[in-house]
């Protein structure tokens, strides 16, 4: 089998253990795997930014913006946004390499259970794309990530079309209008799923809508902390 990232052949060293108990086929080679850097060290308890502070300055500003209590309980991210990850995300998300996303399944599932084990009766909601963006990309990366997780999933948000977030400045993202429409009210805790947490604006737009409609708690789980 060839690595889904670099396309080099994956060579498995055979020993008696591998012969008797064949390992699960690896989707990526060891060289590429080592370049997928997990978030480590101290991080902001609210947004997963690597920092010595318990709550980073950005999250304190969000708290003030929302009148003393952030609409997002916390975000948990798995990987850092390294140069290698930027290349992988571009191939997966923007160039339509759907299969490449499967390399994240094991880690995304494992860290979900570590981060959200105490959240009971939660419903997972993937952040939607607009219809125009979905037609352009052919799949929603957030829905693919959500499919790796076991809790109940619902698509109750829709999204109006607008300029790509990646094309906006930080200030433009933070002060952008809420692009989401809620199609159904829920009284369960919600875990929003998306690929990248950058400023947190997109996730908080969705969280605000859900909280205003009666959701008691809204969390987010993202693959990467930008």
Image (tube, rainbow, N blue to C red):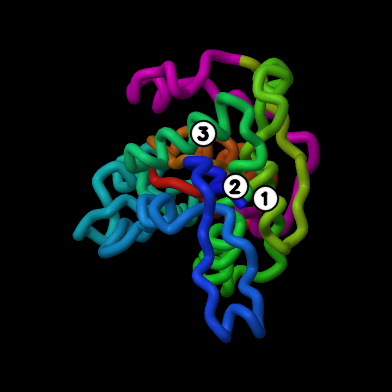
Q: Quadrant of residue 86?
A: top left
Dot 1 falls on a residue whose secondary structure is helix
- The residues colored magenta run 162-191
Q: Nearer the viewer, mark 1 or mark 3?
A: 1
The quarter of the rendered structure image containing the C terminus is top left
Q: Which residue is mark 1?
A: 146
Q: In front here: 190 or 7?
A: 7
Q: Position of residue 130 (x, y in %)?
A: 68, 22
Mark 2 and mark 1 residues within 8 Å of each other at the beta carbon: yes
Locate residue 183 relative to residue 220 in the image: left or right. Answer: right
* Circle number at residue 193: 2
Q: Position of residue 211 (x, y in %)?
A: 61, 46
Tally the marks: 3
* Circle number at residue 202: 3
CA gap, disc 2 and disc 3: 11 Å
Specify few, some or many for label 2: CA neighbours under 10 Å numbering under 14, 14-19, or 20 or more: many
- What residue is drawn where x is 53% and y is 41%? 7
Dot 2 falls on a residue whose secondary structure is strand
- What residue is drawn where x is 46% and y is 53%? 75
Locate residue 66 relative to residue 44 in the image: left or right. Answer: right
Residue 174, compared with residue 49, is above or below; it is above
CA gap, disc 1 and disc 3: 17 Å
Say whether residue 175 is magenta: yes
Q: Position of residue 171 (x, y in %)?
A: 33, 22
Q: Earlier in the sequence, mark 2 or mark 3?
A: 2
Q: Nearer the viewer, mark 2 or mark 1?
A: 1
Residue 208, compared with residue 175, is above or below; it is below
Q: Is residue 184 visible?
A: yes
């Amino acid at each position: 089998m060839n690595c889904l990232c670099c396309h080099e052949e994956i060579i498995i060293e055979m020993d008696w253990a591998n012969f008797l108990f064949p390992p699960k086929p690896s989707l990526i080679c060891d060289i590429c795997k080592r370049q997928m850097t997990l978030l480590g060290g101290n991080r902001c308890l609210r947004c997963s930014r690597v920092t010595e502070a318990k709550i980073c300055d950005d999250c304190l500003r969000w708290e003030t913006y929302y009148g003393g209590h952030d609409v997002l309980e916390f975000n948990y991210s798995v990987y850092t946004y390294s140069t290698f990850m930027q290349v992988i995300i571009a191939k997966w998300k923007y160039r339509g390499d759907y299969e490449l996303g499967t390399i994240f399944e094991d880690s995304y599932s494992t860290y979900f259970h570590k981060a959200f084990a105490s959240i009971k009766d939660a419903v997972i909601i993937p952040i939607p794309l607009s219809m125009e963006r979905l037609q352009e990309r052919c799949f929603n990366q957030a829905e693919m990530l959500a499919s790796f997780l076991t809790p109940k999933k619902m698509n109750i948000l829709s999204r109006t079309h607008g300029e790509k977030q990646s094309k906006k400045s930080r200030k433009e993202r933070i002060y952008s209008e809420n692009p989401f429409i809620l199609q159904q009210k829920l009284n369960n805790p919600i875990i929003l799923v998306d690929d990248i947490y950058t400023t947190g604006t997109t996730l908080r737009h969705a969280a605000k809508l859900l909280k205003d409609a009666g959701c008691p708690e809204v969390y987010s789980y993202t693959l990467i902390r930008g």
